[in-house]
Image (cartoon, helix red, strand yellow):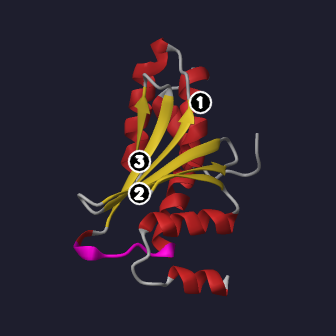
Amino acid sequence: MASLEHYLETEDLHPIDLVETLAAHHDWDFDRIAEDQIAMAIEGQWRTYSITLAWSHHDETLRLVSTFEMEPPEEKLPALYDMLNLANDTCWTGAFTYWHAQRLMVYRYGLILSGGRDAGADQVDKMLSAAIKASERFYPAFQLVCWGDRTPQDAMNVAIAEAYGRA
């Protein structure tokens, strides 16, 4: 890890280069889509999450989009949207949305690095960790609302409770 930390401390490291180095270090599947974009797959307890990070020079923001497939019944969409609002009220570092046309649940986060700031390995690691933790935390609640006939408020109790073991 010492050599990785030394490499990551190098000034002027492009944010996507940093993400690529972290992905390689963690042995995650990734694909460098473009100079300013990388896609990867990270295995969670409930799902494999498709994560894309993109660097925008224009607004100096490192954007993270984490997705997983979800195809709720049409009649459950209002309850799912209520659930999303409740979940987002507890997420301070990002937010969920549902892309109906693509049938994807999405967690989005933007790290603003204005004024020529550089992203640190810890910052990027925290971004990725926050996306996975939030998705893992709320995945069961989304499922209960869409397929378990639970109210969003009731399902939220599952997301707030400490998890012990695996169902």
Identified by mark 3, the residue type is: Arg
Q: 61 and 108: which one is in front? A: 61
Above-or-below relation of 154 to 29: above
| Element under disc 1 | helix
| Element under disc 2 | loop
Residue at 53 percent of width and 21 percent of height: 72
Q: Residues within 10 Å of mark 3 (few under 14, many from 20)?
A: some
Above-or-below relation of 8 to 79: below
Disc 1 from disc 3: Cα separation: 20 Å
Q: 102 and 150: which one is in front? A: 102
Residue 23 within the segment the image draws in magenta = no
Identified by mark 1, the residue type is: Gln
Mark 1 against mark 3, which lies toward the viewer?
A: 3
Mark with earlier residue (1, 3): 3
Q: 157 and 82: which one is in front? A: 82
Identified by mark 2, the residue type is: Asp
Q: Pointers 1 and 2 in contact (CB under 8 A)?
A: no
Report the residue marked by disc 3.
Answer: 108
Mark 3 against mark 2, which lies toward the viewer?
A: 2
Q: How many marks?
A: 3
The N terminus: image quadrant: bottom right
Above-or-below relation of 163 to 17: above
The C terminus: image quadrant: top right
Residue range in magenta is 115-121
Displayed quadrant of residue 48: top right
Report the residue marked by disc 2.
Answer: 36
Residue at 46 percent of width and 70 percent of height: 123
Q: Residues within 10 Å of mark 2 (few under 14, many from 20)?
A: some
Q: Would residue 5 appear left or right of 124 to someone viewing this image?
A: right
Checking the image for residue 143, the label placed there is 1
| Element under disc 3 | strand
Disc 3 from disc 2: Cα separation: 17 Å
